[in-house]
Amino acid sequence: MATNAKYWTALGDPTRRAIFELLVERPSSVSGLASVLPVTRPAVSQHLKVLKEAGLVADTPSGKERIYRIDPDGLAAFRAEIDQFWMKTLAAYKLAVEQPTKDET
Amino acid sequence: MIKQPRPAPVKHSIVVEAPIARAFKVFSEDFGSFKPREHNLLAVPIAETIFEPRVGGHVYDRGVDGSECHWARVLAYEPPNRLLVSWDIGPRWQIETDPARTSEWEVRFTAETEERTRVEIEHRNLERHGEGWEGMRGAVDSDQGWPLYLRRFEDLFAKAA
């Protein structure tokens, strides 16, 4: 089961974020990704492995290649977004609730 | 094809330096003051976000042009201990009108001391959003939702660095 930490680790790397963003736009093969990124195909494969383990992308065979796309049912990435929403909301809430109460009515 | 497990609930907690009554009041009545503004399904910027503090109330964004986006319903309102609210936004970042296909978030407030409160959020039943729409995979609208949310990821990491 994917944990919050896994999402953060998976998307905490700029190259992996770039890969994820490209896959949001369209499914792609390793070579397709490597052709538009400044990294080697083995590096792309390694990053995809991490994203896959986090449940953020899935792959399907297509001829000699595998086609990668964001999570197959849409929910893992959706969950990651909700997770991020609450992290950000709670951080902002803490600031709001701890500020001096002079503006409270 | 990997088999997706049912998504685990999203859980977060935070300890704030505030009495429980204030912690609850700010979280509900002032929700719009800290909810990320860029989290927006309206076509225009958000002027304000309203949390109606009662069972049956709505949480909604009001745009600068007066348009409204009702994206949550208050299911339980139990000051100062608990809130239960629906999440009526689907995986394609559209409003979900079928309550059976919405998730829910519970907020629990626990006094650690008179001046300190633990706030726990559990956002659960995420799998309900998935029912019946599997055929739409790959249809994520890259112009609307995703780039914005990805930028938010980046912003957050930038702050953490």
Image: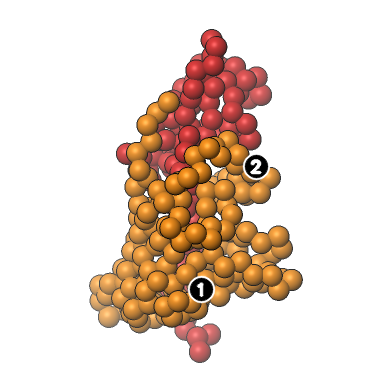
Query: Is disc 2 in the same subunit as disc 1?
Result: yes
Q: Chain of mark 2?
A: B
Name which residue lies at 47% across and 29% down: A58
Mark toward the viewer: 2 or 1:
1
Chain identifier, orange in the render: B
Please, what secondary structure does the residue beneath circle 2 have?
loop
Q: Which one is in front, A39 or A25?
A: A25
| Residue labelled with disc 1 | B58
Q: Is B146 placed above or below A58 here?
A: below
Q: Is residue B145 visible?
A: yes
What shade has chain A been given? red
Q: In the image, what residue type sits under mark 2? A: Ser
Place of residue B36 in the rendered image (x, y in percent of width and height, measured from the top left) = 56, 62
Q: Which one is in front, B63 or B98?
A: B98
Name which residue lies at 46% across and 80% down: B53
Q: Is B57 placed above or below B36 here?
A: below
